[in-house]
Amino acid sequence: MNINPNIKLFGSLLILVLCTSLSPLIAQSDPTGEKRVTGTYAITNATITTAPGKSMAGATILIKDGLIHAVGTNLSLPAETQLIKADSLFIYPGFIDGASNSGITKPNDPQKGENFNPSDPSDELAGITPWRQVMDHFDPKSNQIADWRKTGFTIAQLIPDGGMLTGKSAIVVFGNSKSSNVLAQNTGLYAKFRGSRGTYPATTLGVMAKFRDLYKNAELSAQHARIFASAAGLTRPEINKTYEAFYPVLDKNIPILFEVADDLEIRRALSLQKELGFRMVLVGVTDVDRVIDEIKGSDTKILLSLNLPDDKAFKDKKDNESEDIKSRLDRVKAAHQNALKQAGILEKAGVKFGFITLGAKSGDMMKNIRLMVANGLSEDAALAALTINNAEILNIQKFTGTLEKGKLANLIISTKPIFAEEAEVKYVMADGYLFDYDLKAKNKGNGIEGVWEYTSETPAGSSGGTIEIKKGDAGYTGTITYDDPAGTGKASTGMNSITYSDNTLSFNFEVPVEGNLLKVNVTGEIKGGSFEGNLSIAEYGSFPMKANKKPNL
Amino acid sequence: MKKFTSIIAALLVLGSMPSMAQTQKGSILIKNATVITITNGTLEDTDVLVENGIIKKVGKNLSASNVQTIDATGKFLMPGIIDAHSHVGLDAVNEATSPITSEVKMEDVVNPYDVGIYRALAGGVTISHAMHGSANAIGGQNITLKHRFGTSNPQDLFMQDAARTIKFALGENPTRVHGRGNNNQPRTRMGVEAVIRNGFNEAIQYKKTWEDYNAALKKKGATPIPPKFDTRLQTLVDILDGKIIIHCHSYRADEIYMLINVCREFNITNIVFSHVNEGFKVAPELAEYTMGASIFADWWAYKFEVYYSTAYNAAILTKNGVVTSINSDSGELIRHLYHEAGKAQRYGELTDDQTLALITINPAKQLGIADKVGSIEEGKQGDLVIFNEHPLSVYAIPQMTFVDGVKYFDINTDANDMRIKVSATDAVEPIFLKEHDERCMHGVDFFFTNFGRNLFEHSH
Amino acid sequence: MMKFRAILYTVALALSPILAQAQFDGEFIKPRNGRFLLQNATIVTVTKGTIQNGSVLIANGRIEAVGTNVAAGDAEVIDCSGQFIYPGMFDGGSQLGLVEVGSLAETQDYAEIGQVTPNMQALVAVNPNSIAIPVTRVSGVTTILATPSGGMFPGTAALINLNGYTPDQMYAGFKGVILNFPSSARRSTWDRRSDEDVKKDAEKAQKNLNDIWERATTYHQLVSAKAALPYYPEMEQLAKVVSGELPLLVEVNAASDIELAIKWLENKEIKAILTGVAEGWRVADKIAAANLPVITGPMLAIPTRQSDRFDASYTNPGKMAKAGVKVVIRSNDSENTRNLPFNAGFAAAYGMGKEEALKAVTINSAEVFGVADRLGSIEVGKDATLFVSTGDPFETRSQIRHVFIDGFRVPMSNRHIRFYQEFLERSPGLEKN
């Protein structure tokens, strides 16, 4: 069986990495003048919250070699210490993100080929890529990393993109861009109830069945390998990288990170766990009030999204609506209110949980936490969900999660108590590197030109492709690729009527189906490098569509 | 010794305990109703007592302490209606990507929030057979649901003591999806037969492979290598072993006859044909070799293979001795199956008892639950519905519906809006102008065939 | 058990000696007209009460006499003891005859390409020999509005009787141009547009409608002023609506859309009928105040919203009728237009009452379509379009015994019945011998 690099191993590896990379022995000149002068900092006279519920006023924190050297008052500071006056400022442990797709690109879909048989696709075509390593699809220079770091995140578990089994996650620190910043790889196997459009398994039905069969056959495959190693005269085991990728799950060295969209998916994941017995972390949990007993009765870790539903549906509604409509709106309002209460419900039930940025917007994060706090979540629990709880769920609490001597120098320096409305993050230190937010970073141009990757959710599962937009003299031109309705591979066509104004992008394209041209209209909102909107087809309805811009190279 | 037996007893008790919490069981005394028992005639001014979910007593002047009493004077009481073909309460219907998908289970995708379940209750339906769609020659394993609406837990809806069933499908749908849609077998009715036959034969091999392995394990010093595990084939093995009832989507007489022959060859007797629009043409064969036909009252002409249909199907089948039921296959029809059954009186003049059997004891037989539900008999489960008039009148309105003696529908006290879960973001609700029925081909047409045609047309 | 079968066989046997030399067996029974006296029936006239033990005399395609004392003369007497005579039922909207097999594009003749195609005439595409027509008429549904569908102005609907070999023989005297009023509704659970987008799209469609309407008005004004305009068949047809020559059938369903449609119609001096009106109950008072007749159905449909009471579609016609709206019922079906009476039955059970529901498939329909002088009730001088039933025709257990359309006695047979005759006792049965 494969070696499972477990997290403890990586922890010790990490110390090694830190010692070598930061050692002055390999110091060099830097003609750009950008290199920092010292790695030793003292942030003085601040209110330091070392862990949820534990604060001290007028304290100093000393950072050395990327680690917290001391926290307290009356510290003796070494000569090379750079002082950062933090009078009236507040210091917190750096946030840890339980699941993030920042900087992650979706691997290209493989081509289906001429004689593609949708009932018997390769694992890769079926969205089954458990062997994939997320670090192979990670761009550490992504703006998304910078955006989240600015809100206080210093560590994230990165989630690979893909189908029902996307691959192995990894944990990175948001430190110096010259380091690989990897804290651990192979931290979990990421799974979701996502079918592969037009290919087995295409729906939740198929995904559940496929998951069971994969798991059981991985067990049998391991059994075969063991027997083969112990006796002679036996058929050799067929090496199958999908099964092998399951081995650390079977051995309970790593959990399955199961992405769930609602309480019904939570139940589905729980029932798979019950049947098969793997370790599990539920990612993106919602509707906990409906499954709280089942969650408590399982040994499953919980990750909650920092995304909350918006209140547009009822915010601007007038009072003079009919009773009929009012009672309907009241139910939407109640559902919305309930969505805000979820974190509080978990806390009350005594379930430890962590927050994730997956699916959330960095601009809304603090507002959303305040909404959760206003709806029953304590500030201590909110901080725990951003720090120590996630450290425990990711099994990295030994070297991060609180501000203690010997832990990673990951911290946030805020102008006010962190969850206060007026609070601003002034500095973030990640891996001992200081990020100063005095200067407001300028938004980079948000042009739509470039290559976008999109996905769309439709009744038969998700589909996707790329959109390429160019700007010419006569306005925008573009091409789009899509899953050919004839069932084989991708087709591509030109985009028509591309317009972009007020952050709204719209265009249409035509898909030939059974001799007819079916017009598909797309419209949606652009925010930074992401697009969220709808794809609508004449009388059939409209389907959510999301796209992300690939970095312009 | 004594100690040993008590341990065994304890183990037995534990073993028989369902792994989930018990669903609610109710007690109720319904007085002075016209009781349509289905299996034992119609009894005037009769009382029915349900205790802890089970019909305890049917008779006159019954009394019970601490049990809620309902006066049903002038009203009609019949067993809960059973729908042998439904897709209500499911998040997905078709895993349409392979001609055989016997490994998929509808119990994995039950959605207890579907307000369609409540609407079925409001039509007196207490049990529905939540089926896989008809895209594949051999579809998924179905789940029989008891309409215990109001729960968040899908398992609360499962009828735990129901027989295992599986969906098969013949004719246009599987040949369109796989043959014409994906250029895979089957493209013809010949291919459908071959696919099913191949499946059974492979299952026989699979069974043998595992039997050989298990036998080898018992030999001392042997180190057999485990074969690959395959739920798909194992499920087919279970069919061959008589553990699963086939419910087969079918229309034309020739394809029905084909599957009868295949089943006879493989010694399969647990088979019910569903839709069966041309079942009337092979009624003697259906009567002789199968568990019957589950049909539409009058649907026809929505596709070519149902063009040569007749609304007299129920009458012809019944009079030929075929166990016949009328199903909905629709989130709309399931709300008035009593009316759909009534059409068998317009078209063929069946008696009241014959007609009501179409939606009670007959579907119960086809689902393997006739010993538990489908008639008002002492010892059966307390699934009941009270009508204001005779249920075969077009003016009949269900008043209350009970499952396991618990009332889940009351026309006088229920709220208008019975949704359990509501979107937190959408104030503009979808408006359904053509019936949003939960259809056999749900989710398939869009991508394989009718892309560019009318999504809302019938496609059963 | 099978009276009508016995009758058919008797007729066939009586004729068989004549056919002995023919190369094929059996006799085909054709619709035939003549003089008929329907005797000893309970006559439900709809407009003039119910007559016990009455008779109806049919001659020259019309109802010649109705009463308790009608002499047969040379008329063929049909004993209707214990049976009931009703006027033929109207379906206020169906695709019967415009499609033969639902899923086969080759047989779908109800939806033309284009958004503005009011010049598409349903009457042209009705197939008089559709297998579904005899299947329908033996239920007592004798007259239907054949309706195209599709774009914003999908075409012109035509009222037809379900007997005749050419569309003109079937034509029953009413045409109307259909408008699919722009919808602000979410189309299904898979319609995931944002609330704002839904609204925006509806506003856009509304503006589009107004632009087209303005063109039609201009066309009408210029033509009225004797202008020689270039050929423009779409506007020519719409101009007939502007002038009041043809009514506008406004298909509209969501409550907010119904209100918009009422407002849109307010200042237009045209004849308008609302159709669909699935959420009419929400705004019934407003429809009544606008004095607009309504063609609604099917009742056997799921409620328009998940949040609606389970019986919303059953109670809709009754609620509108109570508010004072003139209601006509439709099946909006094609091959199963025969279910119209059952739709009416559900409407009756859920608040409309039997009498009002019967009107909604007979005299109300005739009035709304402007043919009440000829159809919609059992009255002397009206067309002999009626049927004889063993009971309430809304009840599934009732048998329809005779159907007359335009004075023609139509055969009580069709392919469904012939299959029953052939297969009830199949020969050979299970064994060949």
Image (tube, coloured by chain):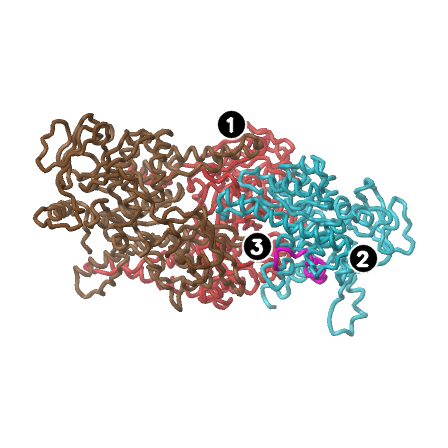
Chain colours: A brown, B red, C cyan
Which one is closest to the eye, mark 3 or mark 1? 3
- The secondary structure that most of the magenta stretch takes on is loop
- How far apart are the alpha carbons under marks 2 and 1? 62 Å
- Amino acid at circle 3: His
What's the residue at 39%, 66% (across, down)? A116
Mark 3, Cα crowd under 10 Å, few <14 / some 14-19 / many 20+, is some
User: In the picture shown, does residue B195 fall above or below B367?
Assistant: below
Helix, strand or loop status at disc 2: strand
**In this view of the protein, which residue sits in the foreground, C216 or B35?**
C216
Which residue in the structure is indicated by mark 3? B458
| Marks 3 & 2 on one chain | no
Q: Which residues are magenta?
A: C113-134
Asked whether, in this view, residue B213 is left or right of residue B426, the answer is left
**Amino acid of disc 2:** Phe
Q: Residues within 10 Å of mark 2 (few under 14, many from 20)?
A: many
Instruction: Examine the structure image and report whether residue C94 is included in the region drawn in magenta.
Output: no
| Residue C388 vs residue B321, the one in the foreground | C388
Place of residue A289 in the rendered image (x, y in percent of width and height, measured from the top left): 39, 34
- Residue C316 falls in image quadrant: top right
Quarter of the N terminus of chain B within the rendering: top left
The answer to whether residue B100 is visible is: no
Check disc 3 and report its element: helix, strand or loop: loop
Q: In the rendered image, which residue does mark 2 sit on?
A: C408
The tag earlier along the polypeptide, 3 or 1, is 1
Residue under label 1: B67
In the rendered structure, does residue C132 fall within the stretch colored magenta?
yes
